[in-house]
Image (spheres, rainbow, N blue to C red):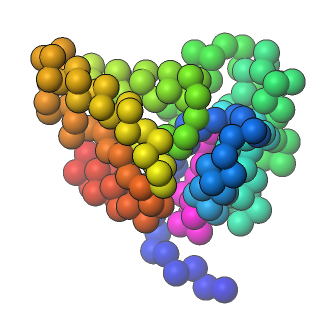
Amino acid sequence: MPDSHPPPALRSVCVYCGSSETTRSEYLDLATRFGRELAQRRIRLVYGGGAVGLMGRCARAAHEAGGDVLGVMPRFLERREIVYEAVPHRMVDTMHERKFIMFEESEAFVVLPGGIGTLEEAVETLSWARLGLHRKPVVFLSEDDFWSPFFHLIQHTVEAQLTPASFMDSVVNVHSIEACFAALEARTTTA
């Protein structure tokens, strides 16, 4: 089947997401569809290296659809997150190394549903943007309102004058895969 997508403006996207297998099936399905879409658009997936949960579903779908995937796994998480051996990965010693390599290897970030680890990765990436250390797009994606409480919290910090209102322009919350790619493309061309 011919490729229906033009060469990508983005070459690589880091995906932050949960490693839980016991979460809602809709979230696992979203990760699968998103990984497949990355491959179809010829955008490399950079992710935490695991074979479980949303991480594993996204990577497996991208790989099986012929996509390029890079996993980054701290050695101490090998047994917990289980390295997805079918794709290239880099083994590191610390979470800091993992996040730095994922940052360096990516041109944009997509945050799928996840727990405290996902939130920590996303917040650090947003903090770096707030400090002017990068202008890479950050898009939160869920098909329900999973991330709405987080965006309410950010708005609360804006209203308390602890975060400038302009910061809201550096992050977006979308509810479909198509809207996610539209937001990434819009922010990539203006970055």
Q: Quadrant of residue 147?
A: top left
Q: Nearer the viewer, residue 121 or 43?
A: 121
Q: In this view, which residue lies farthest toward the bottom?
A: 1
Residue 7 in view, yes or no: yes
What residue is rendered at 49% in x and 31% in y? 103
Q: Quadrant of residue 168?
A: top left
- Quadrant that contains the C terminus: top left
Q: Nearer the viewer, residue 90 or 60?
A: 60
Say if 12 sits above or below 162 in the image. below
- 44 part of magenta stretch: yes
Q: Position of residue 52 (x, y in %)?
A: 78, 39
Q: Position of residue 2 (x, y in %)?
A: 61, 85
What residue is rendered at 66% in x and 46% in y? 24
- Quadrant that contains the N terminus: bottom right
Q: Nearer the viewer, residue 156 or 16?
A: 156
Q: Nearer the viewer, residue 19 or 74?
A: 19
In this rendering, position of residue 167 left or right of residue 1: left
Residue 68 in view, yes or no: no
Q: Quadrant of residue 32?
A: bottom right
| Magenta extent | 37-47
Q: Position of residue 90 (x, y in %)?
A: 72, 31
- 96 part of magenta stretch: no
